[in-house]
Image: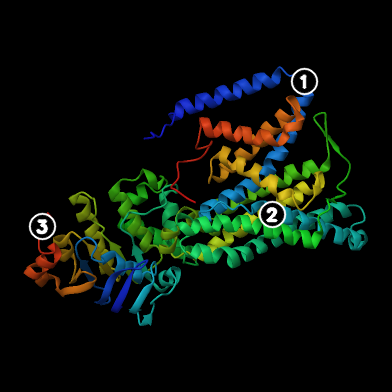
Amino acid sequence: MLKIDGLVSGYGSVQILNGANMKVDAQSIVALLGGNGTGKSTILKACSGLIRSWSGSINFDGEDIHNNPPHKIVERGLVQVTQGKDVFPAMSVIENLRLGGFVLNSKQKLEDNLQKVFDYFPRLDERKNQLAATLSGGELQMLCIGRGLMSNPKMIMLDEPSAALAPQIVLDIFKNINRIRKDGLTVLVVEQNVRMALLLADYGYVIKDGVIKVEGDSKKLMYDDTVKDSYLGGGGTTANV
Amino acid sequence: MFKTFRFTRKIENILMLIFTAIFLIYISLSPDMNIDSLKGVLIIGVTVGIIYGLVAVGISLIYTGLDVVNFSHGEFFMIGAFTGLTVYNFLVDGELIYAIFPEAYGVVGYVIGLFFAFVLMGLFGVLIERVFLRPLTKKGGGYTVAGMGIIICGFGLSVILQNVAYIIWNPTAHPFHADLGLPINIAGITLPMTYLWMLVTGFVVAGALYFFLNKTKMGLGVRAVAFSKDISNLVGINVPLYISIIFGIACALAGIAGTLVGPTYQVVVYMGYIILLKAFASAVVGGFGSLPGAIVGGFTVGLFETACSFFISGSHKDAYAFLLMVVVLLIKPTGFFGVQVKMKA
């Protein structure tokens, strides 16, 4: 589905990615793991066209999408859900969701997708006329994922869906991610919560210093000491590991 | 060092009410005060206010969409007035309209003039944005050092556009004799038809803008891009296209406002300068970056200015708008509808 070869990118003149290689198969959940500042989010931003990739190639669904404008990439069916729970706070939940389906041309499809999202997240249905600013953290994350699903994507990239959420809500959201995959979507999930992500995913990549250090089956990665080492950067502890 | 000091919202509102009360008591003690003059001030104030509001909405739209203050906006107003005048004169002098509409040639010519001012200024705005502002916004937009460049570019653009208008239409004042019919009498006030046109067209355009922004898909996109370009990118909105649309709409509003004002004064190359500053004051009073705020601010500035120049002294007309702006900035820095926004250039 998505194939990244030798991706080099960064912000301004600061190079973050130093030739990352990744492959995401269709209808799988792939986890991209790593500590702070290792380039996880940068890979996603390069894939969704928010930042330019300096060299290397990004192949999505058989086509090269490297340095396409962001809206073209969304039209192709690759959607990113950002980390910061970015919504339009002054718009209602339903308006936020409608914006997610901005690339759809038919009204019927928009309504169908709306129903689908409400089916995944009934909480959003209850609060559809509320302003997005009044939602709780978990509901905001649901809204972000729901908005990503509105455009009928083939693949969705989630940037830390568990960040700053209570364990119960994280579990709920991860269950829904699994359900989204069962409905035929491909999911790439970037996480700091290693155990949860590996329980969810089929395959995992560990990134460090802008290159993929370890990859493998998630069941195997879970007990791999090198994962622990590269994740911790040779020191310090993280509560999640 | 310095501590930032702000009144709480409640105290701000009480202070604004006290200021309003003092102002109202002051003008009601004026010897000119009677019910007829009050009615006149209200109608003229609202009429002038809707024009300030339309230009201020444009400034606010560009501010939210491109993250910069557009200092060349007054020139779009001026060129819009010239466009309306030229189209009107061409149609009426060409005697084509006489043949088709012998009764209402002036009205038909004026409506076509308004339409052309709206459409041509919109397209002109898109062109200006693509050619002059796009390279600058590409370098990072209003939040960065390039934002300062865009502001200076706005000043430069203002001078260039004035000189282009100077070459095309020469520097003399052009009278705009729109033949719209005899003055009418509303509630005992004799009002020239041009004022009625300003009033009605202004409200229709403002209403159409409200409908466009809140009920159409493109309007939803405009609001999204105005709030955040990053999220808009993620949901698949063609952001560069929408920035052009925002700039085009803002310029089209200025153009139609110019043609509306034209017949009441004269059309001059220098007319854009003062309306820019007045509209700026309106936008600040209403809350910078807020569209309903811009319209309300326009009404406030228009009413305040008209009341002051009628009841206090007419010779300082242009100063009152800024007096109000200074008072609002002192008491309620966010304006009526404003929120404390992120830093923009």
Q: Is residue B119 above or below residue B311?
A: below
Amino acid marked by disc 3? Gly
Q: Is residue B46 left or right of residue B154?
A: right
Q: Is residue A176 left or right of residue A96?
A: left
Amino acid marked by disc 2? Glu
Q: Is residue B125 above or below residue A131?
A: below
Residue under pointer 1:
B34
Query: What chain does mark 2 sit on?
Result: B
Q: Nearer the viewer, residue B12 or B209?
A: B12
Residue under pointer 2:
B75
- Which numbered disc, 3 or 1, marks the residue closer to the eye? 3
- What residue appears at the point 25 percent right and 62 percent down from the top-left corner? A177
Secondary structure type for disc 3:
loop
Residue under pointer 3:
A236
* Picture coordinates of residue B251, whole percent (x, y): 65, 56
Quadrant in the picture for the N terminus of chain B: top left
First in sequence, mark 1 or 2: give its number.
1
* Picture coordinates of residue A2, whole percent (x, y): 30, 77
